[in-house]
Amino acid sequence: MAATMLLSETAVEKSPPVSNWPWLAEFRRKAQLDFRSQGLPNTRLEQWKYTSIKALADTEFQVDTDAMDVQSSLLQRDKAEYLKAEQSAAEDDRLVFLAGRFQAGLSRISPLPPGAKLLSLRQALEQEHPLVRAHLGRIAKHQGHPFAALNSLWLDDGLFLYLPADCQLRRTVHCLFYSPSGPSSFTSYPRLLILLESGAQAQLVEEYLGSIQPGDDNGAAQFTDSLTEVSLADGASLTHCKLLRESAQGHHIAGLHVEQAENSRFQSFSLTLGGGICRNDVQVRLTAGGAETRLDGLYLLGGRQHLDNHLRIDHLQPGCRSEVFYKGILNDRSRGVFNGIAVVHPGAQQSDARQVNKNLMLSIGAEIDTKPELQIEADDVQCSHGAAVGQLDDDALFYLCSRGLERNQARALLTFAFAREALGRIPSGPLSERLEAMTFDALASQMGGALSMGRESLMEGAL
Amino acid sequence: MSNIMLAIKDLEVQIAGKAILQGINLEVAAGEVHAIMGPNGSGKSTLANVLAGHPDYQVTRGRVFYEGRDLLSLSVEQRAAAGVFLAFQYPVEIAGVSNIHFLKSALNSLRKQRGEPELDALDFLSDVKAKMAQMQMDEVLIYRGVNEGFSGGEKKSNEILQLLVLEPRLAILDETDSGLDIDALKRVAAGVNAFRSPERALILVTHYQRLLDYLIPDRVHVLQHGRIIRSGGPELARELEQQGYGDPQQTALEIPEVTDGSHHVVK
């Protein structure tokens, strides 16, 4: 009989056996204490008011390696899909993870510029890389983030990327975390540590992919608790993409914690196309003048999916800029939560903070709770925020139908157009094309083939 | 009269409980051009919208036959597939859907509803470009979002481009001339004239006579307070231009005052 445990059970002796190094054992012990002092969050907490993780907390997850074998067999089955994906992103450096574990055989890392490090976190831990020791847990705080503490407690593998000053990584680093839903429940705790020295530049894609086979939606629950730490030194720039394509049984709680120095730039696009209970916690600290952050996102929710986007940007010093632009499309009985807050700290004059969240409700059973917030403790700032919740425009529907489009086709077209405004914020290139095609396909399957005229035709023409 | 394309009989229409059309009778034969003129609020645009199937309007009485079919029983897209086209007074801007994709989807949807095969993409594109050239439209406009950021004149030209590409049999132009300078008006009129044929009919809804200098109608109807109060040949439009719709005491038209309309109550 396979051993199982609940998320709340945090005995250190059950911790993955890689902590041969005293510092890591100490790191875990501290994480365990940090977790115990908070426990799993509940809906009485303001930050978790709209997101109940009770179903997750009550799920028994397997902790032995049998489950890993099952995952491996599912991987064999789905390999053809990988090869396809491989071709579509031939220019990328690709790191594939199965249930959180790095798969060297499916990965490809091209030669790196001098001084650059790109390897799995497990390898980095084994090499006892001084940079990992110095920076792991430095940016992501456990307090107020119990799932960050849980990740630190169980972390086992993930990504380590380091770029020395002025180093530019030409290829996109694409991390694919694959967690197919099989007969048993499984957890994974990917950890990503990204360190960019001054003037360094990189592009990173974090993709979380659940079952490719539609039948797997009936499989056992999978849970991913990922944590990404990003440190950007002066003038460094990271373009980041978070792609969430879990199955209905794929639950996902992720932290993205970013610290930015002077004139650094962080641009992130978060695309959510599938999942069970999901949450993205994004925390950005702008610690010196000229730092700029841009968080864009799009979510397409259907079925009984739940997605909570929690964003916090701290303007700690004068002259920083932040911009948040999230759009959502909610269908069926899905539920969305958006809570973005920009905090302008005392003395952070000439801060520029903007936030927009727009939602398109396609079904009477869907729900969105949206709350963009500003907390301003300086007097010379430019800040704005706004939220919108609405339905498809009747005049536009009439216009399209009067030209012969069938009603469901017109609805699908307007829905895709709504999504496109968000997708248009991704810098154009192979990635934006891939995300647009992916969104189109997800929308087409959700709208029952109403977009049957084909994506090539819809992609035609610049907008 | 076997070539009657459109027959409107005793049509009464309300919007939000307010009576707008109060008994319209009109017959349009294939090959004909009819102008519907009248002051603001007379019901011209309501007539245009109700024929296209706008959901906000309620038909409370009367019938409309189009090529022998009961037009009012058809959905908006079925009317389009049957060959009815409305050029909008205020074309809707749709960001995120390119003009070319919109045209192609519309045409393929019409063809599908009629049981015809889809068009070849290259033939379609060259056809659209030729028609844009005819309308003197900038080609970049087909790659922009539908009407997105178009000038008033470009929007109206775009409506006529759709007319030329979709090739309906009955076209209703709702104040297509409003807001156009004289050059744009001539281009639009030239486009519409190119559309005219013995198999097609046109209804021009307009406030002014000036469009009718370039698009000569067979019949002119004056709409006031929801009724057609006068019909005549092209000369009627010129008469209206000189004398206005206005007050019956000051014109020779002797337009009777309507006193029983509920629209007098709502002010």
Image: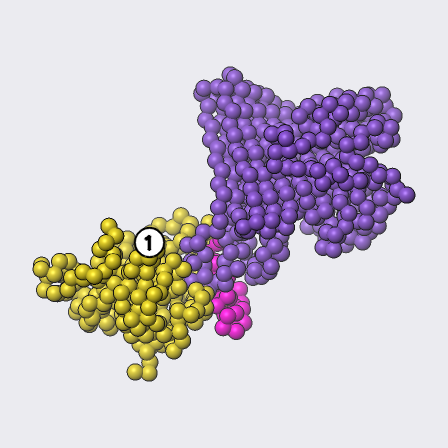
Can you give x and y, in whole percent of width and height, for residue A124 in the image?
Answer: 80, 30
Farthest bottom residue in view: B2
Chain letter matching colour purple? A
Residue B243 vertical position relative to residue A183 in the rendered view, above or below = below
Q: Chain of mark 1?
A: B
Farthest right residue in view: A1
Magenta stretch: give its range. Answer: B97-122
Can you give x and y, in whole percent of width and height, for residue A314 in the image?
Answer: 57, 24
Q: Is residue A103 left or right of residue B5?
A: right
Query: Residue at (32%, 63%) from the top-left corner?
Result: B13
Q: Main secondary structure of the magenta part?
A: helix
Chain letter matching colour yellow? B
Q: Is residue A151 left or right of residue B244?
A: right
Is the image coloured rainbow, by chain, by secondary structure, or in one colour? by chain
Q: Is residue A62 left or right of residue A196?
A: right
User: Can residue B22 be seen here?
Assistant: yes
Which residue type carries mark 1? Gly
Query: Is residue B109 rendered magenta in the image?
Result: yes
Dividing the picture into quadrants, the one containing residue B49 is bottom left
Question: Circle 1: is it few (<14), some (14-19), or many (20+) Cα within 10 Å?
Answer: many
Dividing the picture into quadrants, the one containing residue A25 is top right
Q: Which residue is mark 1?
A: B153
Can you give x and y, in whole percent of width and height, for residue A348 in the image?
Answer: 51, 19
Can you give x and y, in whole percent of width and height, for residue A399 in the image?
Answer: 42, 58
